Image: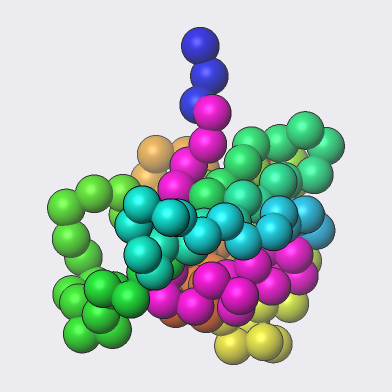
Amino acid sequence: MRIAHTALWTSDIDAAAKFWESYFSATVGEPYESKRRPGFVSRFVHLPEGGDQIELMTGPWLSPEAPDERIGWDHIAVSLGSKAAVDALAERCGADGCLKSAPRTTGDGFYEAVITMPDGTPVEITT
């Protein structure tokens, strides 16, 4: 078994798509607009080298006033393969203003940093 894809809601699907293209060299598919659920739009993000897929989803019912934490998925973690790669992307994101927490070794042994998508969704970058 494997995870087919991970999905997340975003308030700005185009900004989210650019985030994944810019910071992860991902390829983003064309928008899909549901005929059964008016206003629902999704786009699939394909990570390089046969990596996983992420489905970005949006709809007019999403509200920026929604609480930061809610029941459901909290974040996605993307393994970059090395401490140097984590450090380099964290430095780039720091300069761009989307670094939430600097690289560190966590209590459970992960070397990671946290960056944020344009709508504030956290993305852990790990070794």
Q: Colour mode?
A: rainbow
Instruction: Choose between 94 and 18: the one closer to the eye.
Output: 18
Which quadrant of the figure contains the C terminus? top right
Give the residues in magenta.
4-24
For this view, does 61 lie left or right of residue 20? left
> Residue at 51% of width from left, 60% of height from top?
33
Q: Give the percent coordinates (x, y) of residue 16.
A: 57, 71
Instruction: Choose between 125 and 51: the one closer to the eye.
Output: 51
In the image, is residue 38 part of the stretch drawn in magenta? Answer: no
> Residue at 69% of width from left, 59% of height from top?
30
Q: Give the percent coordinates (x, y) of residue 97.
A: 59, 88
Q: Give the percent coordinates (x, y) of residue 89.
A: 72, 66
- How many marks do you count on the picture? 0
In the rendered view, tell whether residue 93 sits above or below residue 32: below
Q: Give the percent coordinates (x, y) of residue 83.
A: 71, 51
Q: Quadrant of residue 19?
A: bottom right
**Residue pushed farthest top?**
1
Instruction: Choose between 102 and 72: the one closer to the eye.
Output: 72
